[in-house]
Amino acid sequence: YGATVYVETQGRAGTNLKVTRPLKLSAHSAAPIQWYVDGQPLKPDAEGDFDWSPPQEGFYDLIVANASGQSAKTRIRVVAIPDGGRP
């Protein structure tokens, strides 16, 4: 996999994470871009930004694609840090 991403959560880690701050996904490419997590498209917010709150710890495939069809893919591991603790 490509990276381990630590997310701050409220309460214990488990299958239904309550992420304190969502992850901000960004890419440098010609607009518009689209992000996918495990093949499912993410919807941008009103400003066109992509925020993602992983539902649980584990591995995820992230893909970003631009309007011309170019894409990049990586696999990440999400690890929860309960109540602002340390990994």
Image: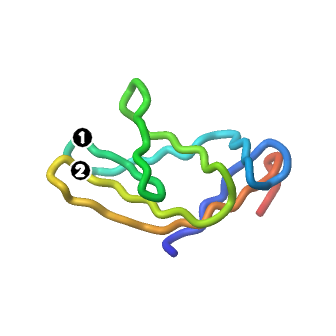
Residue 45 x %, y %? 43, 29
In front: 30, or 37?
37
Q: Which residue is drawn at 81% across and 51% down?
A: 82
- Determine the secondary structure under disc 1: loop
Up/down of 78 relative to 36, above or below: below
**Image check: 10 left or right of 55?**
right
Give the Cα separation between the discs numbered 1 and 2: 6 Å
- Determine the secondary structure under disc 2: strand
**Image check: 75 left or right of 68?**
right
Up/down of 80 relative to 59, above or below: above
Specify few, some or many for label 1: CA neighbours under 10 Å numbering under 14, 14-19, or 20 or more: few
Residue 32: numbered disc: 1
Up/down of 36 relative to 2, above or below: above
- Disc 1, disc 2: CB below 8 Å? yes
Residue kind at label 1, given as amino acid type: Pro
In front: 86, or 62?
62
Residue kind at label 2, given as amino acid type: Asn
Q: If you read the primary sequence from the N terminus, does the residue marked by circle 1 or circle 2 appear first?
A: 1
Q: In which quarter of the image is the C terminus?
A: bottom right
Q: Residue at x 51, y 75 (%)?
A: 1
Residue 66: numbered disc: 2
Res 70 quadrant in image: bottom left
Residue 36 x %, y %? 41, 52
**Image check: 75 left or right of 55?**
left
Looking at the rendered structure, the number of numbered marks drawn on it comes to: 2
Q: Which residue is drawn at 40% across and 46% down?
A: 41
Q: How did the renderer colour the structure?
A: rainbow
